[in-house]
Amino acid sequence: MTQEQISNKLRSGMEMEKDNTVSRELTARVVGSGGLDVLATPALAAWIENAAYEMADLWLPEEETTVGANINLDHMAPTPVGMKVRVKVHLDAIEGRKLVFSIEAYDTAQQIAGGTHTRFIVNKARFMQKVQDKKNQ
C-alpha cells in the first residue's frame, strides 16, 4: 500500500477507546512483574497495543495488518482487581508505514498511564514468510 493509499483511509487524529476490567490473572503477582495484586504493567501494555491494532486494522485491506515496534509507557498509579480501565489511543502521525500513537489509560478514579506506541503496517504473507525463513535457518 502506498503512502497515499494509507492516508486516504487512516488519518492522523483518529482515536479508539476500549474498556477492560482488571482480573486476578492480570495482576503483577500472577503475571510475574511484581508481588502485588494490582494491574500488571505488561497487561496494561497489551491492552494498549490491542486498541491501536484494532483501530488501524479497521482501515487496512485484508492482506495487511500492523505489528508493534515500540511502547513507551508511564504506569503512574495502581489499579485494583475488579476495577474498570479505559484505554485511549490517538493516531498522532503516519510516516510511510509507521504509525505513531499517543496513549492514555484511566481507571474509574484517575489517569493511570500515558505514553506513546509505534506500529508498522506490514503485508501479512510477506511478514510471515520472513518468520518462516527465520525459523528454517
Image (cartoon, helix red, strand yellow):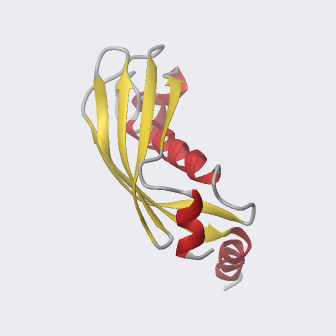
Q: Say which of 53 and 26 sits in front.
A: 53
Looking at the image, is 32 positioned above or below residue 99? above
For image coordinates 44% across by 33% down, the residue present is 87
> What percent of the width, then of the height, locates residue 1?
63, 74
Looking at the image, is 11 positioned above or below residue 114? below
> What percent of the width, then of the height, locates residue 15?
47, 42
Q: Say which of 30 and 121 sits in front.
A: 121
- Total numbered labels placed on residues in the image: 0
Looking at the image, is 122 positioned above or below residue 38? below
Using residue 17 as the reference point, say whether residue 117 is left or right of it. left
> What percent of the width, then of the height, locates residue 120?
51, 66
For image coordinates 70% across by 72% down, the residue present is 128
- Tell me where residue 37 sits by quadrant: top left
- Tell me where residue 32 sits by quadrant: top left
Q: Say which of 15 and 19 sits in front.
A: 15
For image coordinates 48% across by 22% down, the residue present is 22
For image coordinates 39% across by 17% down, the residue present is 80
Q: Say which of 131 and 58 sits in front.
A: 58
> What percent of the width, then of the height, locates residue 58?
65, 49
Quadrant the C terminus occupies = bottom right
